[in-house]
Structure formats: C-alpha cells, structure tokens
C-alpha cells in the first residue's frame, strides 16, 4: 500500500522523464523542491511500513 502511494505521487514525473529519454532528449534535473518532496514522501512510506 505505501509503495503504491509513492508510485502515484511520482507517476507524472517519471512518465515525463521516460518520454524525454525515449525521444533522445536529455532528462530534466531534479529541483530542490522535488528532492524535498521525494525525501518527505519516502520517509513517510518507510514509517508506514515500519508501523504496519
């Protein structure tokens, strides 16, 4: 369940990166805001796994 939430949160970003890669264009660099969101969601998912 927690991993499914992580997948839903980042599905759009990952889809966009894959499309860029497949078209031969360079992938976008991740921003500080995206890094912070990823870290926060990752920590929340790990905590859910530990608790459940």
Image (cartoon, grey):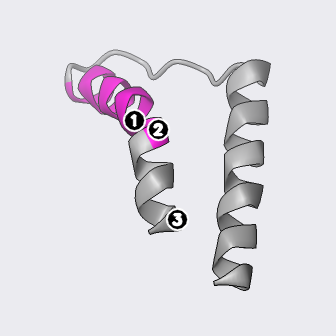
Instruction: Decide whether the magenta segment is chiefly helix, strand or loop.
Output: helix
21 vs 45, left or right, is: left
* Image quadrant in which you'd find residue 40: top right
Q: Residue at x 45, y 23 (%)?
A: 27
Q: Residue at x 67, y 41 (%)?
A: 38
Q: Which residue is mark 3?
A: 2
Q: Which residues are magenta?
A: 9-22
In the image as oriented, which residue stretches furthest toward the left?
23
Q: Which residue is mark 2?
A: 10
Element type at mark 3: helix
Q: Which residue is mark 1?
A: 14
- Residue 52 in percent (x, y) is at 63, 84
Q: Residue at x 34, y 23 (%)?
A: 16
Q: Nearer the viewer, mark 3 or mark 1?
A: 3
Q: Nearer the viewer, mark 3 or mark 2?
A: 3
10 vs 45, left or right, is: left
- Separation of disc 2 and disc 1 at Cα? 6 Å
Was residue 45 drawn as part of the magenta stretch in this picture? no
The total of numbered circles placed on residues is 3
- Badge 1 crowding class, 10 Å Cα cut-off, few under 14, some 14 to 19, many 20 or more, is few
- Badge 3 crowding class, 10 Å Cα cut-off, few under 14, some 14 to 19, many 20 or more, is some
Front position in the image: 13 or 24: 13
User: Sequence order check: which comes first, mark 3 or mark 1?
Assistant: 3
Is 4 situated above or below 14?
Answer: below
Is 15 situated above or below 45?
Answer: above
- Residue 8 in percent (x, y) is at 40, 44
Front position in the image: 21 or 31: 31
Is 41 situated above or below 31?
Answer: below
9 vs 25, left or right, is: right
């Amino acid at each position: 369940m927690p991993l499914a939430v992580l997948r839903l949160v980042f599905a759009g970003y990952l889809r966009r990166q894959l499309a860029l890669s497949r078209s031969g264009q360079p992938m976008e660099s991740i921003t500080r805001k995206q890094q912070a969101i990823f870290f926060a969601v990752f920590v929340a998912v790990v905590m859910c796994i530990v608790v459940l």
